[in-house]
Amino acid sequence: MKDCNRCRAEKETGFWVGKDALEEAIQRDVREKIERVLQEEVDAYLGAGAYERVTARVGYRHGTKERDISTSAGRYSLKVPRARLFDGNGGEEEWHSHILPRYAKRSKSIDRALIGMYLGGVNTRRVKAVLRPLLRGTPLSKSAISRLVSRLTSAFKEWQKRPLAAWKFQYAYLDAIYVKSRFNGRVSSVPILAVIGVSARGEKVLISLSAKGSESSEAWQGVLDDLAARGLKKPKLVIIDGGKGLRTAVEQVWREADVQRCAVHKLRNLLSHAPKHAHDEIRDDFHAIVYASDFGKAETAYGAMVKKWRKQGAAVAESLEEAGKELLTFFRYPESQWKALRTTNAIERLNLEFRRRVKTQASFPNQESALILMYGLVAGGIVKMRRIDGAEDLFQTSTPLRPNPEAMVLEKEEMLMAA
């Protein structure tokens, strides 16, 4: 009779009413496979299968226990094998599975989903709603999220102290990201000094995050000194913004590294010295420099822009000269990498994703919470750092910048005019 009722309901609604036989079969198969994997794990630890008599055995089985676990394929009630291991001193100790750790109620894939949604700005109530079909009754409290965040905090603190001697970074991007954080009872804008490196395989790697009181040379030197103390070798090229404190720190710690000033930061600075009606013209002149087809043409465009804006807007020319030829350092490197090396956009990307995450959050309760969130976005794969453009040309040697004869003529003209 029940089957007839189900058939009638299915005919009327177009959907099968009741349990899905296919889904049940899949779940039964998955449960059996998980239990088989656990049996194989205990066999490997004991050095023998069930009832197998071998001299290499290091323990013995003693039944099973029931465990519930939620996975990406659903929730299962499992029979987990139990075993005792000989400790070598005539005693025994309980065996514990590494595949299914003690007290674990969820698989690591679900934990990653939970922390990913938290870092993505989803509150606990919505996390529960989204994962309810997957958790299938497994309790999920605020404390569960808090425990995951606590583990993330521990991972961040270990990451801050990890040795760096084994790494060799060809390039390094350095810039500050400002966040609103509470300090000593007041909310203020705090700079997080970020360092991203380009590894020998061309991969961008987050090296350091530090909350400081300012972008002073002392603050930046503290960051670079810490990296050096942990064994980080001097990069070949450093890409920085126009902050004097950062430039001074690089000069002190990484004296021999090439320096590239960020073209985006410099353009913003140039535009700040002129009225809006002149912005398009300044932008075009500046692009003629940084998007030139070679160093010679860039140098000629640089000289022409300085000469032109000395007459039309001295502040613009002075700002351009302040950066000097460090705007053109990237021309020494393979052309395939120019786009990646002329700006600090690698850190701007991290900043953008961070802003998207905290746009509804007025301020952080402390500086550490901002650092942990930023680290979690990268460590959790929410912010993905792709390989640098032109990674295949990474080990090409940089070429000396040969002056362009036309640019030398312009410089002589400027000297004569100044005289």
Image: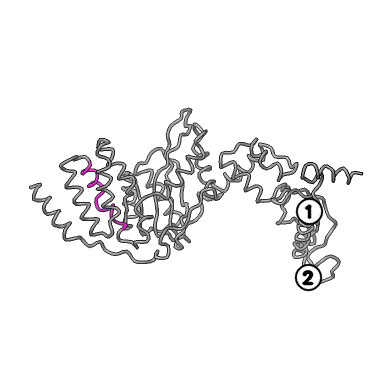
> Which residue shows up at 43% across the image and 36% down it?
190
The image shows residue 328 at horizontal and vertical percentages of: 28, 55
Judged from the image, the secondary structure of the residue bearing numbered disc 2 is: loop
The residue to which callout 1 is attached is 22
The image shows residue 113 at horizontal and vertical percentages of: 63, 47
> Which residue shows up at 24% across the image and 48% down it?
285
Quick check: is 320 in the magenta stretch? yes
The residues colored magenta run 316-330
Judged from the image, the secondary structure of the residue bearing numbered disc 1 is: helix
In the displayed image of the protein, which residue is found farthest to the front? 12
| Number of marks in the rendered image | 2
Report the side of 413 relative to 306 (left or right): left
Quick check: is 317 in the magenta stretch? yes
- Neighbor class of circle 1 (other Cα within 10 Å; few <14, some 14-19, many 20+) is few
The residue to which callout 2 is attached is 56
The image shows residue 182 at horizontal and vertical percentages of: 48, 32
Report the side of 105 relative to 65 (left or right): left
Report the side of 347 relative to 314 (left or right): right
Quarter of the image that includes the N terminus: top right
> Which residue shows up at 37% across the image and 59% down it?
337
Judge depth for marks 1 and 2 and give the one in front: 1
Name the magenta segment's main secondary structure.
helix
